[in-house]
Image (cartoon, rainbow, N blue to C red):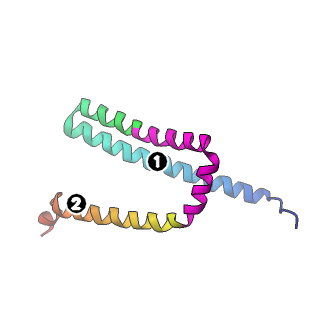
Amino acid sequence: MPAREPRARDVRLDLFFRENALVVERLSAGLLGGSVVGSALTVQGYLSGVTQFVSYALGMGLVIVVLTLALALFKGVVVGLLRRTLPYFQTLSAVLLLLAGVYLVYYWLTVGQLAQAIF
């Protein structure tokens, strides 16, 4: 059976969703980085804010560089590993998201003293 040619609409929709995903990812990373740097600037001063920004940028950049180099140097191994582990990513990400939510609730109720402010 011959492969189906992609229709122009399919390609446009694919590009539309990819571009939107990229915009959302960049906005969320920018907002997170901005909140980290902004809070450090207002609470701890200029030098601390710059240090937070540089640390955040280096951490984000390091992850991208390591993943890119790993894929370039060990393409077959990385692709094989991803194919074997891909079915578990959704479950793992759901568990991590739940744990992050539980931690945030715990933090704000205890350390953040939200419970004392409410009750």
Between label 1 and label 2, give the one nearer the viewer: 2
* Rendering coords of residue 5 (x, y %): 83, 59
* Rendering coords of residue 60 (x, y %): 43, 41
Q: Residues within 10 Å of mark 1 (few under 14, many from 20)?
A: few
Q: Residue at x 84, y 62 (%)?
A: 3
Main SS of the magenta part reads helix
Disc 1 designates what residue? 27
Question: Which of the 4 image quarters holds residue 100?
Answer: bottom left
**Amino acid type at mark 2:** Tyr
Question: Which of the 4 image quarters holds residue 35?
Answer: top left
Q: Residue 60, relative to residue 86: is it above or below?
A: above
Question: Which of the 4 image quarters holds residue 108?
Answer: bottom left
Magenta residues (range): 59-87
Q: Residue 58, relative to residue 35: is it above or below?
A: above
**Amino acid type at mark 1:** Leu
Disc 2 element: helix
Disc 2 designates what residue? 107
* Rendering coords of residue 50 (x, y %): 31, 31
Q: Residue at x 35, y 36 (%)?
A: 55
